Amino acid sequence: TSDMPWSKKDFNNFLEGIKYKILSIDNDTKEISVILKFPKGWKQKSNLNLLVDEEIYILSGSININNQELNEGCYSYLPANYPRKLFISDNGAEVLSFFSGKLSYTKKINKYNKNNFIKKISLFNDGWDNNYKGINSPEIASSGSKKKLLRTDKKNGDQTWIMGIIPSYQEKKVESHPVVQECFILNGEIEGNCGTMVKGSYFWRPRDILHGPYGTKTG
């Protein structure tokens, strides 16, 4: 993604004044994965509430939503209709966002699913999980690599997690999965059947596609 230019044309009125890089758009569900670049001093001019879910991971800088500061390494899940009474970025930020459908918004105050709301998870402050519960990856687990499970959708089983792979790790198998996968490299590098992915690299892979084996020299 470091080779991709920033788009300056407004992505949506909800994100007015924010540069962006579109990583993928699902033609069926209209789900969007995007990097957003908030300028210093950005503020949403009016209280607009998204009609789709948004997953947020802060790559750098910080944003503030309803007086909750989200800085580098922080994750949040905002359900559709979550009210954003305050939405600002004093210092600027680069944010990895995943929207559950085509961006649409309203000024109306509607009910949102409080059970799906995740206010804040900080990888740096909370640390890695102590076990591999929730992720079926015994080969990686036995290597000493770490994971941080951020979210599991109770209805369809979709998951979001961060994986920290130890240096000199090498898988031995080629595999496929019955689900769509997407991956963004936060740090380090990983090598696979499609080449080497470095910090900022991204892929979106349809279900049932053979891939691997993967490995990394640096972690």
Image (cartoon, helix red, strand yellow):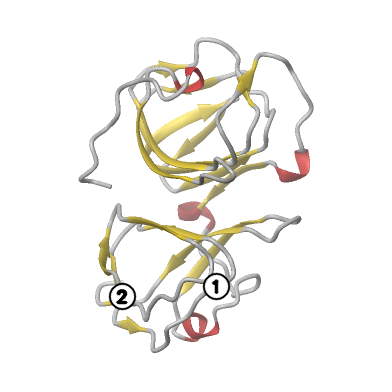
The residue lying at 72 percent from left, 44 percent from top is 116
Side (left or right) of 32 relative to 202? right
**Tag 1 secondary structure:** loop
Against 53, residue 81 (above or below) is above
Q: Viewer-proximal residue, 139 or 192?
A: 192
Q: Residues within 10 Å of mark 1 (few under 14, many from 20)?
A: few
Mark carried by residue 177: 1
**The residue positioned farthest toward the bottom in the image shown:** 172
Q: Residue at x 42, y 83 (%)?
A: 174
Amino acid type for the residue under numbered disc 1: His
**Whole-percent x and y of residue 103?**
55, 29
Q: Quadrant of the C terminus?
A: bottom left
Q: Going by the picture, which residue comes out furthest to the left?
A: 3
Residue furthest top in the image: 45
Q: Which mark is residue 33?
A: none
Which of the 4 image quadrants contains residue 129?
A: bottom right
- Image location (x, y in percent) of residue 93: 37, 33
Residue under circle 2? 193
Identity, as a three-letter code, of the amino acid under mark 2:
Asn
